[in-house]
Image (cartoon, grey):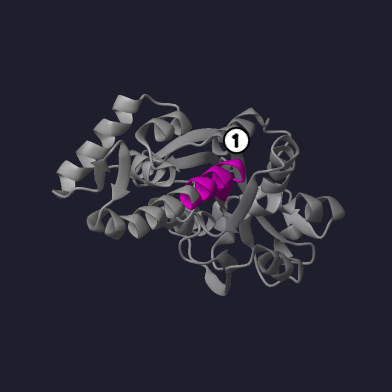
Amino acid sequence: MTIRHLKIFLTVYECNRMSAAAQKLYVSQPTVSQAVAELEKYYGVRLFERMSQKLYITEAGKKLLPYARHILDSFEKMELEMKDAGEHAILRIGCSVSVGTCMINRILDEAEAKMPELKIYVTVDNSSAIEKKLLSNEVDIGIVEGVIEDRDLELTPLWEDELVVVCGKKYPLSGRKELDIYNLDGENLISRESGSIERNQLELLFEEKNIHFNRCFTCTNTEAIKNAVICGRGIAMLPKRMVQKEYKSGEIVILPLRETPVKRMIHLVKHKDKFVFEGMRQVMEICKATPDSYV
C-alpha cells in the first residue's frame, strides 16, 4: 500500500466513477481499477460495490476514508514543508575562536551576498568542541585550526596561521630585541582553556624544552586574554592575525624569538557521510577560493 493507492482511492470516492477519477489524475482507467483492486487485496476487503455501472462505497471503504484523507493531508503538508525547507535552507558553521574572531565575517558577507535565502548560524568554540559538534551533527561544517583526530572527519586545508608569543608594552621582556625560548622560563603565562589548540601547542612546545611557567590567568575569552596581556599580567601565545590591531597600535609587543615560529593549518572540516546540499557546497567553495591575504 502506497500514497498513490490512497490518492486513487480517495479520488474514485470523490468522482464516484473510475473513468472520471482517471481523467482527474491523468492516468488510464485500467490503472485506476488496478490500484483499487490492489488496495482491496492488501486489506482483504471490498472498498466499493459496483452495481449498474455505479460505485457505492462499502462499510470497509468508509472506515478507510478518514484515514486516507488524514494521511494524504499530512503527506501534502510534509511536501510543502520540505520543499520550503529546501528553498530556505539552514547552514550551521562551527568555528574555532581565532577563526570566529578574525576570519568568518568576510566569508559570511560573500555567502549572504550570493545566497540571501540561505540562513547561516555560527557557533564559536574551541577546536575540540567543534570536532565533537561535527561528529554529533550539531554543525554542518567546521573551520578550525590545528589537529583533528577523528578519521570520520574530512579535512581540506585552507590557510596557514602563525602563533606568536606576545606581551604588553610595559612588560619587562617587551624591550628585548632578541629572545630564545629559555628566556621565557618562569614567566607568568596567560593561556586558553583545556581543549584549545593554542594551549595544547604552547604546552607541547614548552614541555619539549623543559620550560615551566607560572600559569596565572586561564580564560576561554580571547579578548580577556589580550586585555590581560596589555595590562602586563604575563605573556601569551596567540594567532598573529588576532593581535594585528593591538600590535599596530603599540599596545601589544610580539616577542622576537629565535626559534622557528609555531605555524598551523586552518582546515575546512566536514563529516565524511554528511550530505552536501547546494548552499553548503557554495559556502565551502567560498572558503576554498578565499585567499589567505583576504582573511
Q: Quadrant of residue 51?
A: top left
Q: Nearer the viewer, residue 138 or 82?
A: 82
**Residue furthest right in the image:** 249
Q: Is residue 81 above or below residue 217?
A: above
Judge whether 54 appears above or below 182 on screen. Answer: above
Q: Which residues are magenta?
A: 77-92
Q: Amino acid at mark 1?
A: Trp
The quadrant of the rendering that contains the N terminus is top left
Disc 1 is placed on an element classified as: strand
- Seen from this angle, which residue lies furthest left? 44
Q: Tell me the residue at 76%/66% (across/down).
A: 230
Could one spot residue 118 in this view of the protein? yes
Quadrant hosting residue 165: bottom right
Give the quadrant of the C terminus: top right
**Can residue 145 be seen here?**
no
Most common secondary structure along the magenta stretch: helix
Residue 274 colored in magenta in the image? no
Q: Residue at x 30, y 48 (%)?
A: 56
Provide the residue designation for mark 1.
Answer: 159
Q: Position of residue 255 (x, y in %)?
A: 69, 52
The x and y percentages for residue 285 are: 59, 30
Q: Is residue 3 left or right of residue 189?
A: left
Residue 6 vs residue 131: left or right? Answer: left
Q: Nearer the viewer, residue 102 or 153?
A: 153
* Residue visible at 60% across and 35% down in the picture: 159
Pinpoint residue 10: horizontal percent, then vertical percent.
38, 46
Name the outermost residue toward the bottom. Answer: 216
Q: Total label count? A: 1
Q: How far across and how far down the image is residue 182, in percent?
A: 54, 56
In magenta segment, residue 79: yes
